């Protein structure tokens, strides 16, 4: 119990310490290369946080998220360049447009379950990519969208690396705060109940379809936000940002960090992206390292880094492992569930 | 009349699982549905809880037509159900499993959850209280913080019933609440079902354990091959020739423990 209390105190301190550390990073290094990596980690963490809500907590594996990232990015970019709108309204509209497209896509695709939904969402992602790539009169197609102005709030320009860094940090903290609140609420419990058993959730009076759509729209809103921030940071857009590979990258980050955990997206995205940068000189050969690492990870840490850690801590808090009787009961239960219900 | 089924029929392709069954559940009673394996009991349960849409026939809940209502609407209208396999979240604690049970009576959305509005706080408190009350009702308040995987099979059955109770139901449908537990534990579950009746709930139960049903039920309906072959008090059913034929004459499915 004593250790438990100490652990609680430590975890309460963890967030302020991490925040301080994050705020101090631009003071610790002035190397723009490092800052650039951290900024990109933040941007991708935001969209992976979105994917986590629908795939991790609600149990619906969406592979359309690079597409929604693209919609956010392009809506923002087009508003900034062609409509010459200011930064904040562009950002808000980009997020809303992504959420709107997300709700339509969700209402259609969430009628499917399990693998069918995953495959369909992959197709949605491809369609979104094609729209961006082929609608040349609007998006400039493969030529790319050039000359997105520097984000500006009032008279303050986010021109320096440091200012961009703090902008991304603000939105990352906001995203994680919102997700934290959602996960630890009745709404989050509803999502988890759906992931666990749709049948039981329905029997408990939960409108499963409606809640799936809410989770999906929230996740696309975060994808749109990340896309818009990306566009404001890179200030050049090509259709490849919406390509399906990026959805799989996001899934990889999520699996490495821990799907269905609050900190999983940040840890996974940071770790994989930094590792990729570190091995950059290996070019294509880095996959030789990366492949086996991934296989080992799935074998030995199936719940990802954070997922495995929380499980370990949970076990320790409960004390001893299961007694033999409990273990037997559990295996009996398992057999029964294998035998299945029905008559 | 709590629930009334009129000529309820369910066909899967060419197979008729439930054929033109007339059935009713009286307020405040314990009604049982029995029958050999494959008689269509669970399909019938799925029909009256909204999980299956009937091929034909009508379903009335307290006089209102609810024939094509989805399960979550049925739950909101006061019909709670359990499943043969309990479907609890084994890794979570008992109380965490139960809190979601009262969600259908709350209105908080995403915004309330993120902003932690007054309404949200009030509703979360209510859900927690309701969960704890239901757990006390089934007699397991001390297990609240234990993970479901670490409690006994019988306790899990009780928690599954508590989950149904936390939805504030008027009618509770129990699908084999005593399957897979021993005789002592079975009489414990029977006592719990009686307690539910005394608390004013209407109960409908599918069960194989005849002794339990005979002492518990006010009225019994017997299904065989998708059709109702008998209906009546336990005494009437135990004397009914057709029932004895179905159980003993056809296949030896009857369990008398």
Image: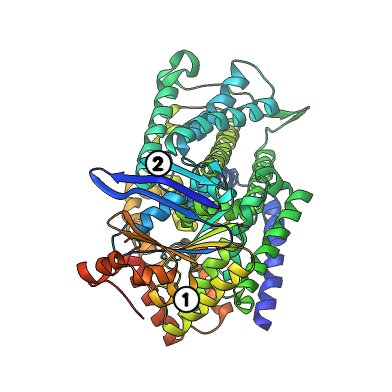
In terms of depth relative to the viewer, which is nearer, A146 or B221?
A: B221
In terms of depth relative to the viewer, which is nearer, A291 or A274?
A: A291
Left or right: residue B200 versus residue A144 is right
Chain letter of disc 1 in the image: B
Left or right: residue A6 versus residue B159 is right
Q: Which residue is mark 2?
A: B57
The disc label shown at residue A76, or none: none
- Residue A195 in view in this figure: yes
Chain letter of disc 2 in the image: B
Q: CA distance from mark 2 to mark 1?
A: 32 Å
Q: Earlier in the sequence, mark 2 or mark 1?
A: 2
Q: Which residue is mark 1?
A: B215
| Residue extending farthest top | A137
Q: Quadrant of the N terminus of chain A?
A: bottom right
Q: Quadrant of the C terminus of chain A?
A: bottom left
> Which residue does the image show at 53% across and 26% down from the upper left?
A74
> Which residue does the image show at 41% across and 52% down from the upper left?
B46
In terms of depth relative to the viewer, which is nearer, B224 or A322?
A: B224
Percent position of residue B196, x then y? 59, 68
Percent position of residue A285, x then y? 32, 50
Percent position of residue B26, x then y? 54, 57
The relative height of residue A73 versus residue B98 in the rendered view (above or below) is above
Left or right: residue B38 versus residue A11 is left
- Residue A259 in view in this figure: no
The relative height of residue A263 versus residue B66 in the rendered view (above or below) is below
Q: Quarter-wise, where is residue B130 in the image? A: bottom right
Query: What SS does tag 1 mark?
Result: helix
Left or right: residue A177 versus residue B227 is right
> Which residue does the image show at 49% across and 73% down from the upper left?
B216
Percent position of residue A18, x then y? 67, 59
Query: What SS does tag 2 mark?
Result: strand
Judge the density around disc 2: few (<14), some (14-19), many (≥20) Cα neighbours within 10 Å. some
């Amino acid at each position: 119990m004593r250790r438990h209390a100490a652990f609680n105190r430590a975890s309460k301190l963890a967030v302020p310490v991490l925040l301080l550390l994050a705020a101090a990073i631009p003071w610790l290094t002035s190397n723009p290369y490092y800052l650039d990596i951290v900024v990109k980690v933040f941007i991708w963490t935001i969209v992976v946080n979105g994917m986590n809500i629908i795939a991790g907590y609600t149990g619906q594996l969406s592979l359309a998220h690079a597409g929604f990232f693209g919609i956010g990015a392009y809506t923002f970019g087009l508003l900034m360049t062609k409509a010459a709108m200011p930064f904040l309204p562009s950002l808000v509209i980009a997020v809303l447009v992504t959420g709107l497209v997300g709700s339509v896509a969700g209402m259609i695709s969430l009628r499917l379950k399990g693998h069918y939904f995953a495959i369909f969402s992959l197709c949605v992602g491809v369609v979104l990519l094609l729209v961006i790539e082929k609608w040349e009169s609007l998006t400039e197609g493969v030529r790319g969208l050039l000359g997105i102005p520097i984000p500006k709030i009032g008279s303050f320009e986010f021109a320096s690396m440091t200012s961009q860094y703090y902008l991304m940090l603000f939105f990352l903290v906001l995203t994680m705060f919102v997700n934290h609140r959602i996960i630890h609420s009745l709404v989050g419990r509803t999502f988890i109940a759906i992931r666990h058993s749709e049948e039981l959730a329905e029997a408990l009076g939960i409108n499963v379809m409606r809640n799936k759509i809410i989770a999906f729209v929230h996740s696309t809103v975060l994808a749109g936000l990340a896309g818009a921030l990306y566009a404001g940071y890179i200030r050049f857009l090509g259709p490849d940002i919406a390509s399906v590979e990026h959805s799989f990258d996001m899934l990889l980050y999520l699996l490495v960090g821990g799907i269905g955990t609050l900190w999983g997206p940040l840890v996974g995205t940071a770790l994989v992206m930094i590792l990729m940068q570190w091995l950059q000189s290996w070019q294509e050969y880095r996959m030789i390292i990366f492949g086996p690492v991934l296989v080992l990870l799935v074998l030995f840490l199936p719940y990802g880094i954070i997922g495995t850690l929380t499980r370990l801590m949970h076990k320790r808090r409960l004390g001893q492992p299961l007694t033999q009787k409990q273990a037997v009961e559990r295996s009996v239960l398992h057999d029964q569930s294998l035998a299945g219900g029905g008559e | 009349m709590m629930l009334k089924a009129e000529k309820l029929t369910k066909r899967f392709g060419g197979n008729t699982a439930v054929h033109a069954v007339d059935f009713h559940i009286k307020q405040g009673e314990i009604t049982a549905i029995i029958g050999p394996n494959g008689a269509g009991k669970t399909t019938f349960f799925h029909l009256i809880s909204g999980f299956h849409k009937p091929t034909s026939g009508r379903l009335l809940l307290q006089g209102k037509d609810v024939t094509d209502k989805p399960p979550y609407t049925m739950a909101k209208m006061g019909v709670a159900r359990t499943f043969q396999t309990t479907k609890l979240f084994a890794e979570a604690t008992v109380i965490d499993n139960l809190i979601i049970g009262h969600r259908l009576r709350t209105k908080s959305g995403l915004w309330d959850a993120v902003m932690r509005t007054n309404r949200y706080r009030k509703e979360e408190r209510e859900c927690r209280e309701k969960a704890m009350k239901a757990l006390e009702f089934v007699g397991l308040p001390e297990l609240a913080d234990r993970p479901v995987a670490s409690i006994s099979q019988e306790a899990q059955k009780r928690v599954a019933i508590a989950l149904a109770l936390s939805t504030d139901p008027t009618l509770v449908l129990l699908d084999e609440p005593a399957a897979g537990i021993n005789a002592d534990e079975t009489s414990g579950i029977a006592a719990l079902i009686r307690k539910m009746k005394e608390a004013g709930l209407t109960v409908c139960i599918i069960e194989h354990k005849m002794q339990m049903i005979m002492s518990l039920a006010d009225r019994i309906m017997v299904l065989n091959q998708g059709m109702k072959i008998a209906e009546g008090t336990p005494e009437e059913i135990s004397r009914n020739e057709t029932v004895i034929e179905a159980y003993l004459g056809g296949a030896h499915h009857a369990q008398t423990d």
